[in-house]
Amino acid sequence: MIQKLLIANRGEIAVRIIRACREMGIETVAVYSEADKESLHTQLADEAVCIGPAPSGQSYLSMERIMSAALVTGADAIHPGFGFLSENAKFAEFCEQCGITFVGPPSGVIRSMGNKQEARNTMIKAGVPVIPGTESPVMDAETGALEAEKIGYPVMIKAALGGGGKGMRTAFSPEEFSRSFKTAQKEAQAAFGDGTMYIEHFVENPRHIEFQILADQQGNTIHLGERDCSIQRNHQKMIEESPSAAVSNALRRKMGEAAVKAAKAAHYVNAGTIEFLLEKDGNFYFMEMNTRIQVEHPVTEWVTGLDLIKEQIKIASGIPLALTQEKVKVQGHAIECRINAEDPRKKFRPSPGTISELHLPGGQGIRVDTDIYQGYTVSPYYDSMLAKVIVHGENRKEAIGKMQSALGEVCIDGVDTNIDYQFEILSHPEYQSGNFDIEFLNTHVIAGVNNNEI
């Protein structure tokens, strides 16, 4: 069993991992940048090591500094959380070479699934439904235009490496293609240092449905049901829920079987997510695999009763899964809202600053994952997420009402937040009816904000 774990991350996910380790009797090491000296995760961990200046490139993205911290403190494992180095195959390989357990899949799996083109080809061979698209990398607009004609417009142009909505553009006609391709490629090169692209048919107005996977070192693989992540802005998820109002029991079985098949085809180990696009007619397509824990993992925890961080640590320690697929039970309905320090009315401008007053909700079926406290200074250097409010109810209607009540209690003074924006989404008749897709925020004016004008 892992004895001492270093968390190569910050914020609420670092706090989340520290708490799970504490319950398991595992010592923890926090790493922090100079800007995060007073952060909650540094105070909760058994040990804390400063790894550099505020810019993430000199701290949380520095493999050498993180590994040095692990070796100096005697940590025998590293949990990367999400973001930063969590899907970096080179970092996972670095851990393997240093004899330190990486709490995640092997480096080779991260590398193959991180390359969208290779991941796509793997799924095709495994018989998992994929969106029609290129099977080889595309490096220039001229070649891409020929492939787009074969696939049929509209098409989605995507970076072969990376994620988070960067390096992605849609072209609805040949006239748009060249400009869209060059823009996406330039963005991909800047964000990921690689301009390799691929092209696929653009599925119009689908739902974004993802399945949580657990796979142990003994070859056992299960899924824990789906999460609906269709409420998103610029490919960034805002509200997630489980189960999905759009997925019937029969469709859940079919998609779940495909997700497990996809994980096995990738030789996956640890917690991961298979992401699908679901059309209104029930057809679904593999989109990508996230080889890490997700921001929205708490909704799955609540409906299944499992602690996914503990499961990750057990799997990394070589312990086989205690659950079989037949024993996985989804009960009730869970929703998560991401609370960000940003102003939706000012083009979602980030809002760093010091929190002067704070009140967070509580009560039956309400959970808040956060690292903020009164007097905490929100840094301009990192992601703007302040907290995740997660609720659980007997059904979707109850969960929505509970989330509205919870958001109504949140008080965060000193910085702007998106709380009112989230509340308005929850109150919209189409959201409440479950009749929405990934274009929801682009086709509705929410809290006076027209996303298409931003």
Image (cartoon, helix red, strand yellow):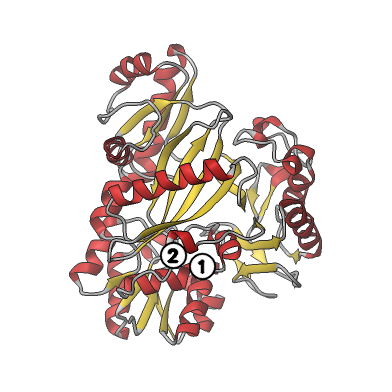
Query: In the picture provided, is 178 more to the left or to the right than 278?
Result: left
Task: Pick whichever, 97 or 280, lies toward us.
Answer: 280
Tell me the SS state at disc 1: helix
Q: Residue at x 58, y 59 (%)?
A: 330
Task: Pick whichever, 246 or 363, lies toward us.
Answer: 246
Whole-angstrom CA distance, mark 2 to mark 1, is 6 Å
Q: Quadrant of the C terminus?
A: top right
Quarter assignment of residue 71 = bottom left
Query: Is residue 153 positioned above or below 96 on the image?
Result: above
Q: Quadrant of the N terminus?
A: bottom left
Task: Pick whichever, 446 or 120, lies toward us.
Answer: 120
Crowdedness of circle 1 by 10 Å Cα count: few (<14), some, many (20+)? many
* Extreme-front residue of the structure: 326
Q: Position of residue 332 (x, y in %)?
A: 66, 59
Quarter assignment of residue 30 = bottom left
Q: Is residue 17 visible?
A: yes
**CB within 8 Å, label 2 to label 1:** yes
Q: Position of residue 324 (x, y in %)?
A: 42, 63
Q: Earlier in the sequence, mark 2 or mark 1?
A: 1
Q: Is residue 454 visible?
A: no
Query: Is residue 207 positioned above or below 274 on the image?
Result: above
What residue did someone put label 1 on?
A: 13
Q: Residue at x 37, y 55 (%)?
A: 291
Query: In the picture provided, is 157 more to the left or to the right than 100?
Result: right
What residue did someone put label 2 on?
A: 81
Q: Residue at x 29, y 83 (%)?
A: 72
Tell me the SS state at disc 2: loop
Q: Position of residue 129 (x, y in %)?
A: 39, 34
Inspect the image, locate mark 2, and give the three-letter code of the amino acid beneath it.
Gly
Query: Is residue 389 positioned above or below 446 on the image?
Result: below
